[in-house]
Image: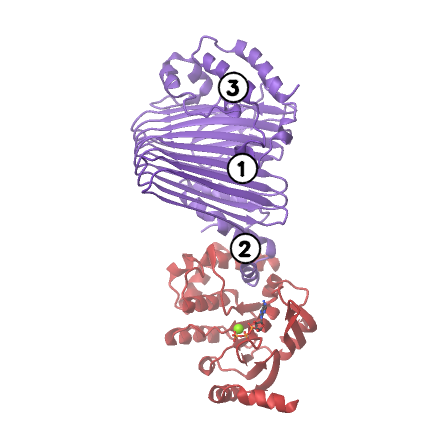
Chain colours: A red, B purple
């Protein structure tokens, strides 16, 4: 589904990603962990098509196609979804209207008619129930004044509405209370199938108890320096990153 | 011959055609003298520093259209808020169109200025109100001199007018270039309530210059809700001067939606002659190309315990230019005044510009006055957020621009107007998305 080859990316001539290799197959869950500032969100943004970052080397293939030239919206139309670490507040656009626009623009890109209003409402009802979101919430301005946890839950609601092929969840667990973490993880698990894939970026093992990864990768200074199974996350939780940093410097 | 000379000479001919014995006659002759002295404003004047009329004054406008022109409703239906039942006062090239209009004298007067100026039964109102609150500047005086036609609305006390009134001035383009001088008078007596929608609409790209003057009197506890829809063709320019005199307990609201036209100057003047009243001025301006929109507002707080609220949003693309000059005067006696003003702008292109200037003259000490103006760009991170959800760049931009301006629509009391404005905005931004909800 996703294949990243030797990806280098920089912002304002400052290199942030320094040779990422990653392959994600349908049905898989990958976790990416790593210290603050190591480039996790940058990787997520580059995959989603944020233009601020310049890809200087390497490429990203989505279902075999190089997506370098595609804008963020075209990547979304192909099924890429990013749950933002810091969802943006958009005053004046309600959650519902935003979702309607997003869904219908995606349908338009695929040559489909707008979704009938009845179906849209039904879908909104189902998905908001799945994530236990109060309907009143949906008429509020997108993310404006939402609490940290509400923003994250709202991101997963959007994911549920858009049914992406490849979902990248950037620290979706941060800010969620214990119940919300369960509800949100539950939502993500319900959306999982053998045809789609999830990349979870997190600092904590806790989330991975709910969304169990097939692979765990450690990102350090713009490179994936170690990959393993779910047990690697436990090890990191117990020991931190220093031992990995030492391993890396020993190699050089 | 300059336009000024042409107008002054034309006045002689015009004078012969009107009733020289009417009380208005002296007002007109006085006014043409003022215009002769003052002429058109130039950029040397502080209030016109950022707006030059030169490019629109160079045309050879006809002052009196040669033909009577007719229009079929179906051809101009889209310019009406046709989804609602309304009174209509419609003009074609400055002449009244009885065919398109729907007036009334049933307890209220919604009719023509020309008949009000001529018929004895309106004499008292005309004497008490006509030309009482206009400023005596060149442009308003020019309008006064030529004022022959427009809307006359008189709502006696305790009446809730059952439906909105639409005033539309069409220009057909049958003249190579046309200058219009519409004159409206609106008198709303105690406890009465009226809603008015005004539009100036050219039907071709021939140059049109409209110099419009509206006087509004909101007497005690009256509510006047006025909507100006400015979405004219690219060679149509509008100088729109509105003077509002308010009495105790009244509420006067003017919404100005400026999307089209070549040059628009809105002079909006509120005089608060009484206590416990509220003046509301709201505007959305979305322009591009070489369009120019200038909002020049004044609220004069004369007595205590009154409020004013101004909220103008502007979005400027291409080489368009905007001006916002908001003046608030609070007299020494006007204690406990609450005056709010905000003007927020987004510049889409490097070549667009806005000059925004609040002007506060406060002589009372116990007042709350706030003003704020911002000039910004569209937020990149918001753009990425929307695009990452599958909303294409153009649509994302439009959605953000709409979101930026749409709180101005909250106070619009007629849902069909709100709908129409959102459609015009979508159209203007070249997108086909519903901004509803
Ligand atoms: N737009 C930008 N301009 C300048 N520097 C940037 C920009 N985006 C990212 N960086 C820098 O790149 C590095 C990686 O940032 P990134 O947000 O990807 O880290 P992260 O691994 O997600 O960290 P965290 O765990 O704190 O979320 C940081 O040093 C950050 O300051
Ligand atoms: Mg991050």
Q: Around disc 2, counting alpha carbons within 10 Å, would you say few (fewer than 14), some (14 to 19), or many (20 or more)? A: some
SS assignment at label 3? helix
Total label count?
3
Location of residue A194 in the rendering, given as x and y in whole percent from the top left corner: 55, 77
Q: Are marks 3 and 2 on the same chain?
A: no
Q: Are marks 3 and 2 in contact (CB under 8 Å)?
A: no
Location of residue B246 in the rendering, given as x and y in whole percent from the top left corner: 35, 31
Of B312 and A83, nearer the camera is B312
Kindly tell me whether mark 2's CB lies below 8 Å from ligand 2. Answer: no
Q: Find residue B294 and name its label.
A: 1
Name the N-terminal-most of marks 3 and 1.
Answer: 3
SS assignment at label 1? strand
Q: CA distance from mark 3 to mark 1?
A: 24 Å
Of A128 and B128, nearer the camera is B128
Badge 3 sits on which subunit?
Answer: B
Q: Where is mark 2, residue-wise?
A: A114
Of A113 and A217, nearer the camera is A217
Q: Are marks 1 and 2 in contact (CB under 8 Å)?
A: no
Location of residue B102 in the rendering, given as x and y in whole percent from the top left corner: 44, 25
Q: Indicate the quadrant where residue B353 lies.
A: top right
Q: CA distance from mark 3 to mark 2?
A: 60 Å
Badge 2 sits on which subunit?
Answer: A
- Quadrant of the drawing holding the C terminus of chain A: bottom right
Q: Are marks 1 and 2 on the same chain?
A: no
In the rendered image of this protein, does residue B374 appear above or below residue A64?
above
Q: Around disc 3, counting alpha carbons within 10 Å, would you say few (fewer than 14), some (14 to 19), or many (20 or more)? A: some
Q: Find residue B34 and name its label.
A: 3
Q: Find residue B325 and name its label.
A: none
In the rendered image of this protein, does residue A229 appear above or below residue A82?
below
Of A26 and B201, nearer the camera is B201
SS assignment at label 2? loop
**For the point 48% across and 9% down, which residue is it?**
B20
């Amino acid at each position: 589904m996703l294949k990243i080859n030797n990806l280098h990316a920089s912002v304002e001539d400052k290199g942030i990603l320094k040779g990422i290799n990653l392959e994600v197959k349908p049905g898989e869950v990958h976790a990416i962990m790593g210290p603050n500032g190591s480039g996790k969100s940058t990787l997520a943004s580059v995959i989603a098509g944020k233009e601020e970052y310049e890809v200087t080397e390497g490429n990203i293939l989505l279902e075999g196609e190089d997506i370098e030239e595609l804008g963020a919206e075209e990547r979304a139309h192909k099924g890429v979804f990013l749950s933002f670490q810091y969802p943006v507040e958009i005053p004046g656009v309600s959650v519902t209207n935003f979702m309607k626009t997003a869904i219908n623009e995606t349908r338009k890109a695929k040559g489909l008619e707008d979704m009938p209003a009845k179906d849209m409402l039904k879908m909104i009802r189902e998905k908001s129930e799945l994530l236990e979101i109060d309907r009143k919430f949906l008429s509020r301005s997108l993310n404006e004044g939402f609490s940290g946890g509400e923003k994250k839950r709202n991101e997963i609601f959007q994911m549920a509405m858009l049914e992406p092929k490849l979902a990248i969840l950037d620290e979706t667990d941060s800010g969620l209370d214990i119940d919300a973490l369960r509800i949100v993880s539950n939502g993500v698990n319900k959306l999982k199938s053998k045809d789609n894939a999830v990349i979870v970026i997190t600092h904590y093992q806790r989330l991975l108890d709910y969304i169990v990864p097939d692979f765990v990768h450690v990102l350090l200074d713009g490179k994936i320096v170690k990959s393993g199974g779910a047990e690697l996350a436990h090890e990191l939780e117990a020991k931190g990153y220093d031992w990995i940093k030492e391993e890396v410097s020993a190699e050089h | 011959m300059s336009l000024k000379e042409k107008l002054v000479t034309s006045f002689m001919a015009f004078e012969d055609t009107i009733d020289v014995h009417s009380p208005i006659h002296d007002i007109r002759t006085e006014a043409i003298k003022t215009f002769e002295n003052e002429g058109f404003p130039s950029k040397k004047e502080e209030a016109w520093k950022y707006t030059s009329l030169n490019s629109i004054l160079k045309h050879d406008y006809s002052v009196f259209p040669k033909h009577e022109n007719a229009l079929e409703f179906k051809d101009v239906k889209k310019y009406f808020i046709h989804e609602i039942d309304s009174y209509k006062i419609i003009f074609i090239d400055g002449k009244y169109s009885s065919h398109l209009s729907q007036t009334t004298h049933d307890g209220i007067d919604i009719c023509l200025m020309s008949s009000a100026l001529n018929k004895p039964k309106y004499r008292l109102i005309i004497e008490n109100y006509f030309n009482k609150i206009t400023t005596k500047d060149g442009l308003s005086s020019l309008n006064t001199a030529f004022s022959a036609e427009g809307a006359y609305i008189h709502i006696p006390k305790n009446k809730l007018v059952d439906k909105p009134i639409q005033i539309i001035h069409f220009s057909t383009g049958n003249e190579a270039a046309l200058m219009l001088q519409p004159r409206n008078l609106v008198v709303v007596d105690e406890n009465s309530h009226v809603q008015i929608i005004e539009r100036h609409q050219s039907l071709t790209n021939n140059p049109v210059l409209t110099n419009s003057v509206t006087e509004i009197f909101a007497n005690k506890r009256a509510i006047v809700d006025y909507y100006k829809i400015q979405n004219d063709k690219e060679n149509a320019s509008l100088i729109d001067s509105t003077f509002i005199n308010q009495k105790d307990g009244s509420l006067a609201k003017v919404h100005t939606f400026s999307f089209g036209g070549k040059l628009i100057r809105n002079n909006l003047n509120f005089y608060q002659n009484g206590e416990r009243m509220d003046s509301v001025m709201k505007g959305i301006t979305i322009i591009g190309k070489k369009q120019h929109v200038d909002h020049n507002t004044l609220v004069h707080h004369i007595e205590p315990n009154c409020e004013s609220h101004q909220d103008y949003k502007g979005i400027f693309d291409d080489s368009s230019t905007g001006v916002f000059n908001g003046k608030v005067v609070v007299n020494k006696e006007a204690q406990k005044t609450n005056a709010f003003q905000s003007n927020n702008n987004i510049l889409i292109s490097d070549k667009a510009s806005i000059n925004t200037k609040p002007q506060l003259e406060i002589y009372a000490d116990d007042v709350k006055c706030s003003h704020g103006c911002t000039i910004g760009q569209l937020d990149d991170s918001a753009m990425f957020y929307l695009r990452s959800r599958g909303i294409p760049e153009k649509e994302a931009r439009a959605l953000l621009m709409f979101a930026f301006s749409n709180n101005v629509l909250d106070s619009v009391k007629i849902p069909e107007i709100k709908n129409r404005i959102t459609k015009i905005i979508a159209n203007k931004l070249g997108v086909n998305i519903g901004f509803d909800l």
